[in-house]
Amino acid sequence: MTASTPSTVLVGREADLGVLREALKRVRGDEPAAVLVGGEAGVGKTRLVEEFFRSLDGEPIRVLQGQCLELGEEGLPFAPFAAALRELARHEGRAVFDGREAEFARLLPELGPPPDFHEARRGHLFELVGALFARLAEEQPVILEIEDLHWADRSTRDLIGFLLRSVRVRRLLLIATYRTDELHRGHPLRPFLAELDRVRGVQRLEVDRLDRDGTAELLGHLLGLEPDPATVDAVAQRAQGIPFFIEQFASSADPRCGDIPETLRDLLLSRVDQLPEAAQRVLRVAAVGGTQFGHELLARVAGVDEATLESALRATVAAQLIVFDPTGGYEFRHALVREAVHDDLLPGEHARLHARYAQTIESEPHLVAPDRAPAEIAHHWHAAHDHPQALVAARRAAESASCRYAFAEQARLLERVLELWEQVPEAATLLGTTHLDLLEETALVAIDAGDHMRALSLTRAAISDLDCEAEPLRAARLLIRRAKLLRNAGKSDGAAEAREAYRLLQLAPRDAAWLRLVGDVAYQTAGIDGEAAARMAGELRSVAADLGDEASQVHAEITFGQVCGGRLPADQAVPAMRQAVERARTAGDVSNCSHGVVNLSDSLFELGDYAESAAVAAEGIPDADRVGVSRTTGVYLLVNYAEALMALGRWDEADARLAEAARQDPPGVLAVAWLRLRARIRLARGHDGAAALVTRAVGFLAKPFLTAEHRVTLLELRLLAALASGDTAAALQFARASVHDKGVFERPRYGWALLVAASRAADEPLRAEIRALAAALPARYPAERAAAAEVAALIGSAPDGSASSGGASVNAGLSGGASGEGGPAGGGAGLGGVEAWRAAVAARRADGQPYQLAGALLGYAEAVAGDRQAASEALQEAAEIAERLGAAPMLAAIDVLGRRLGVRAGVAHVPEQRGDGEVLTAREREVLRLVAEGQSNSRIARELFISPKTASVHVSRIIAKLEVSNRLEAAAVARRLGLLES
């Protein structure tokens, strides 16, 4: 998708807008003020000012605008003032000049011939302009905006200085924009700005580039959908936060940027073409070296004398194409300039310069930053198309990247080695390895880098080249790797590969390598055949004990926790997990420690120790970064951390952690965890972006295979989204399709949350099924027990035949909670009665998750509708929680229920509408009773001795006051809230 027009939404500039608003506030207080807005070309200075003016729409402020012209010091004097005054005259007529049109003709020739006075009288003209602005400002505040001050002529600068230093017009705000990248050392605006810095009321505002999050937000507005992390990373890296560049890439056919858009390329190269020829040659050499380069390296490669080099560099620095970097070298001011210059090289020039860079760095590696020499050499030999040199250099650079856990870089380099293998006949001799070894190594690194689909292809190629019976350990390793990849891609459960791997392992000796492979088989089998996996885990511990190796025993214990953690009570599993994690940490086994921390934090969450779960997960995140598994294990840790923060009611922090997980762009079904949690927060907050996240997450249900955890949580999310949208038919359909999923009993923690959501959507036949499921499903931990209590409150222990309508979950973002508006039959306060809801509130309070507690309080308030004090207190507590969490849909439902009950959250009663303080009048209650009996307006009129028209008016008022859509819903709400009782 591409963007055809620039974004009309301003991104990441709230603080900058605040500066302008504060300056206007001072002007309104009878002070003069000026804001000098600087920034690079395309950074959004004009857009910022436009948004500021848009925010003033309707306010009594006169805005005048003028622009400096790119004509230099000899250009048209006073151009921006002439434009501003011309605009003023056009809107308000010549009378605005107060009879002094002839004198203003110096600025506006169309006013007539100017009087004949020489330069000595220029001060008179300045005083005229100052007096005009002062007169206008007496009527209302005036904003004078001057664009492109870097092109201002001397006269314009002098007049600006006069207004700011001498006249100091009260209630005048001057805003001037200028390009910082145009201000070379001798630019006349530099000393002028320095002078203005000393004037009271004048301030500078530097508009910075957008960060990655700002780039993502702007791209989302431009493309009309949330961009994927890879696109964001590509655009952020190349556009480097310049909004104009971001817009150009978004409008191209491929926002991930295959090539620089032609219009942007021409714009960038136009400034290069203005340099002297010698400076252009040096700039081309520098562009081959990269965005940053050192003076000595450039001197060696350029092959010019020092004076020529310094002269050329001085010209490029003066043109603001190159700047000094903090390390003492040079840096292209913008990466796209370097790219455009590099792409403009001739083919022979391109190869020759890259080869020269490679040779120079090989002979003098100290000329580049530490540890960068291998990668630099590999890059330049590859760009020079010297295949044998490029092959060897890429292999060395991959080894160097491995030492720094730079798996993505290592994977790219190994892929290059594979590409070059067929083009270099002596490749095996040069590298001292086989093609099969290289395939397996590349596949493993691709997994570490998170590119699982590529790893799957490489692993398949390696297996096809291998004699499995002759090398059982290697074959088992490849098969297990393939099983994991298939499972993560959602293509299959990997059972066939796991069984074959285990068979082959029986042919291999029991050593540390065997131990790790059996551990992988056990973990892979756990979600398919728990009994078999438990036997393997037990066998693993036994062999590890026989080996007596600490690392092997730690691995066995970590694996046992992974495989059997869900089969053992969490309170029994946690001590062993803690011990295993500590042993791994003591041994310096960071990888196993990270895996163990994932299991431990998850088990702590299950026990309801949310604070400890969050702390453990947070502690493990840096370790995942250290060993380069941020896209896999690191994502699990971020999600565990976020889930615990959500349970603690710290939603903003949780959302930030989930944003971090999203930025890692986890491959395959690893994305499900962060997607479903972020979608739940957005649903619960009524966020506009909730639907897109839900659609993306629920799309994984189409995969041939998902784990029980993923499947059940996504089924629940789909149901919650339907409830939140008020689509009662879809919600009932999804509930019926979900409750009998086998994952409900495989993972009760998630099964209970699904049953809570299904209970809101259920009709009586489905409620009967849910009762049976709830009776059989174990409720072992606080959250499970709280959900069980809420299910009981929602569906009751047996059908009672009462009607109930109203009720899409206000808790549509998270499981648990009472219903709100527009939902399916069976929502609302449910069928369990007051005691059941009191028990649900107590259980939710014991669990400690605030949002779920607020939902239960809302259900309880409906159940105790006859006790106005109890209902008011419950609504007050629920409202305080919802407000703290930013749960707008729940707040709306609390408000609706409060008005129906005649109470408000935070006060005992609403202001009385009648002497008895009821929502409905006595006559309306009589009419409502007859409506509930199914009487028509004519029958109601005859019963109450009123006209049918009056009866119709009463019914309409009742429907409006109860905020329902028809008579049937009104009757159901009346029964639920006890409005029919005498």
Image: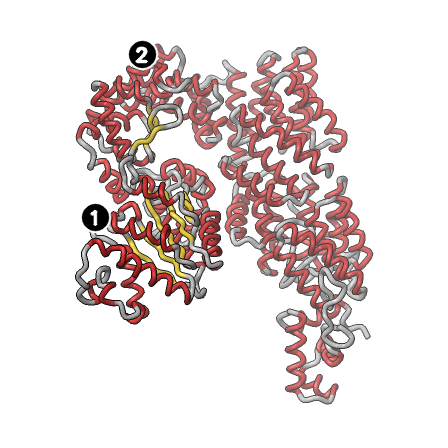
Query: Could you tell me how far apart the alpha carbons at marks 1 and 2 are, in whole angstroms?
Result: 50 Å
Q: What is the x, y in percent for residue 277?
A: 17, 30
- Residue 768 seen by the camera: no
> Which of the labelled discs sits on residue 742, or is there none?
none
Q: Is 94 located above or below residue 413 in the figure?
A: below
Split into 4 quadrants, where in the image is the C terminus? bottom right
Mark 2 = which residue? 363
| Quadrant position of residue 38 | top left
Residue appearing at x 32%, y 40% in the figure: 191
Q: Residues within 10 Å of mark 1 (few under 14, many from 20)?
A: few
- Residue 206 seen by the camera: yes
- Assign a secondary structure to mark 1: loop
Q: What is the x, y in percent for residue 133?
A: 35, 61
Disc tally is: 2
Residue toward you, 595 or 882: 882
Residue toward you, 689 or 6: 6
Residue appearing at x 68%, y 49% in the figure: 851
| Residue 524 shown left or right of residue 130 in the figure | right
Residue toward you, 676 or 348: 348
Mark 1 = which residue? 71
